[in-house]
Image: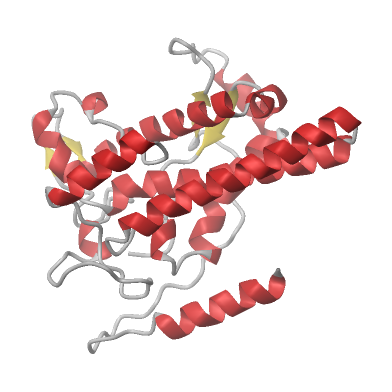
Amino acid sequence: MISRLLLSLVVAYVCVQPTWGQTEKRPPAPPQEPPALDNGATLVCVLCDRPFLTSGHKEVMDKLVSNVYAQELRRALFYQDSIHQFESKAHFDNCDFDSATAYIDSLLNEADGYVKAAGIAEKTGDKSALENSAKAAFFAIGQALHAAQDFYAHSNYIEMSVASVKDATEIPVVPMWTQEGKVLLKQLRDKGLVSGYVFWGVPQKCAAGVKSHKELAKDSESTVSGKVRVPHLENLSRFRLAVVAARAASSQLLRYAFKRWPLLAELNGKYVAVEVLVDRRGL
């Protein structure tokens, strides 16, 4: 396992050296572990049929600090930007949409295997194996969640969508973990959907002339595209619109996961806290 990881990092280092006279430097790998859980995280009630009251927000957040499953979900979100920072598929970079959706599928299939192992452990009364398998499932789901969020920050989907909606919450989620979402993604690509060119990411599948990650990314309100405001949507910035869409996508993916694997909902409870748009690889 460790040797494969080291090999992948070496290959990534060799493959992502600047080309075409590129003089930019690759950003350093950020830390793998998330910071302490605070109010910067989004609290999601996965199994709530209606919007939940926020009056008990602090009490719920305090409980999530000691929730080992919720912790694994958050840890995976941050892990992607360090260990997998060079892989286009992990971040919807470089127009590598096919690999990105296949990657999400593989992570959910991985989670499925862990949940089955957890179910066996539950039947045999092996509490340690049950917890470890369930934690691994949450970690895989968190990795998929990171990719799903990055779609809204790293592609031009927000730019393509805003003209047809009257409210930020109306921006449609693209559920690429479903067949319907994959079909929608193909239709969007036919209409000009692209994601930013990252010279230090592999593979690179964008046509010549596609904007760079630095120009297209909406991971913060200070980026070139992120700071652009949309007048008819309450003058919100594209960054804020990407956050709204990524938050909705996160909720939908978590709801999908809890319905697909009721055991995870039983072990975790209905609340999770996730950071939205946590790309820390540099712009």
Name the quadrant of the N terminus: bottom right
**What x and y, as percent, mark residue 89?**
41, 60
Residue 74 lies in quadrant: top right
Q: Nearer the viewer, residue 51 or 124?
A: 124
Seen as rendered, the residue at the extreme right is: 125
126, above or below 192, in the image: above
At a point 33% along the width and 48% down the height, the residue shown is 151
Residue lying at 14% horizontally and 27% vertically, measured from the top left: 165
Left or right: residue 228 compared with residue 83: left
Say which quadrant the C terminus sits in. bottom left
Identify the coloring. secondary structure
The residue drawn where x is 62% and y is 29% is 261
* In the displayed structure image, the side of residue 248 where residue 69 appears, left or right: right
Task: Decide if residue 277 is in sight here.
Answer: no
Q: Is residue 63 left or right of residue 50?
A: right
Q: Which residue is outermost to the bottom? A: 21
Percent x, y for residue 56?
A: 57, 15
Left or right side of 183 for 281: right
197 relative to 73, above or below = below
- Residue 199, by quadrant, is bottom left
Pinpoint residue 55: horizontal percent, then vertical percent.
Answer: 52, 12
Residue under the point 26% across and 44% down: 185
